[in-house]
Amino acid sequence: MKNHTLAIPILVLGLLHLPTVRAESTAELDQLLALNLEQLMAINVTISTKTRQSLSKAPSIVSVISAEDIKATGATNLTEILQNVPGIYVRENQFGYRPLVQFRGAAATQTLLMVNGAPVKDLYWSTGIFWKGLSPEMIDRVEIIRGPGSALFGSDASGGVINVITKTAGVIGQSEAGVRAGSFDSQSGWLQHGTKWGDFDIGLTANLSHTAGHNPLILADSQTAQDAKAGIKTLASYAPGHAPYGWDGADLRFSMANGNWRLSADYVGHANLQTGLTGGGVLDPRTKGSDNRTNLGLFYNNDSAARNWGFNAELRYYQLDYTSGDGFQERPPGYKCTAVSNCSGAAIGTYLAGELNLQRAAERGVSLETSGLYTGAKNHAIRLGAGYSGQDLYSVEHWVNYGKDPRDPTGKTLLKANAPLTNLTDTPFAFAPEKARQVRYLFLQDVWSFADRWELTGLARH
């Protein structure tokens, strides 16, 4: 008899989905291919309920992409992997060629993208101002929920959830290293190492990369269009010209595990990152930005902590900083503003250095979540949990040579053309206010096996 599962996350019904799943070695792959449908559906996932359960019982539309699946595609980045998943679309923003991941029918801001259960988003730029994906050699598997996951993961997951699980201690069975080279002066080198240190499993992965970018030819940018509209022969625009999208990247991950405990420490950074085009569609050969993100995590998982009880806890911390370097070139040198309404709020005049916008910011966050799974009630698996998340955008620095003069709190006075870089930090005119955000929540989940091969999953979050 075929399994059936009903799911009610906040009283919303979910449907079953059979994902593509492969094993992680040749021997396991051969064994997997020999499985029948019922055996395939017994493969375990955790993303839909935070409790290990078979695919057939997962109360969401779940897909799993294993390391073998990824290897078979020949993908060189997580974004290429996701682009091949039905129902997921990846588009690149013209600003920095930043990949935006979205589910069909939903916006990118409604997609919760996580790495090892930690969101990659920040407080201001959603998926991060300079986020560039993840090297496939570092990925153990990708779990995907299509449709609303807000009951379990919060309001940011209304479109869907993607959790990328990297290779960690206990999973890496041997030492490997490799290099890759490709078009657009792209090179990368990676290594992974797993070993034992006393009673501890140790895992290390590293990836260093460089690319000059595909640098598309832009025949006309928004500066060209604005000059034409104003009846001015274009002299300032860099178009026709190439939009530079080069960058250097580093991804270092360390993990250590012993029994029910696991510790992880990650660093991801980018340097010399060119944005190609500004948010306004102006060619920008000036910007070379950078970002640095550090993640620390301590995890405890005991499925038999006491009679009929399992216990899970996780403590996470992250630190993120980013800068536009010498600034975004919002308008090119020699740019002439003929009307305030057409100049992004700049004063009328000729800007010999162009319009410059220099931004720096730093934030940090800490989160704690604990939950217990009670299995002592007949035909029920009840999970109770609580959590806290705090994020603090504690440093914002902003300099411009155009726009509102911070010496006038009313915002009516504009900086004169060719003004020096002016500090907007700690004023209402900075690109973002320094602010903190705190979230506290409780959740209750019940998986009720009310009949043979039938389950009802209910979840409430407050």
Image (cartoon, rainbow, N blue to C red):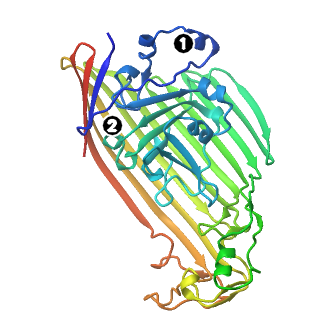
Task: Locate residue 222, reporting x and y percent.
Answer: 65, 72
Q: Label 2 amino acid? A: Thr
Provide the residue designation for mark 1.
Answer: 32
Question: Residue 136: which quarter of the image?
Answer: top right
Q: Label 2's element?
A: strand
- Horizontally, residue 356 falls left or right of residue 200, namely right
Q: Nearer the viewer, residue 332 or 288?
A: 332
Q: Is residue 437 left or right of residue 222?
A: left
Residue 311 pos. (x, y %): 32, 28
Q: How many marks?
A: 2
Camera-nearest residue between 424 and 368: 424
Quarter placement of the N terminus: top left
Q: Residue at x 77, y 52 (%)?
A: 212
Q: Earlier in the sequence, mark 1 or mark 2?
A: 1
Q: Picture coordinates of residue 277 (x, y %)?
A: 66, 64
Q: Residue at x 55, y 64 (%)?
A: 361
Q: Which residue is mark 2?
A: 370
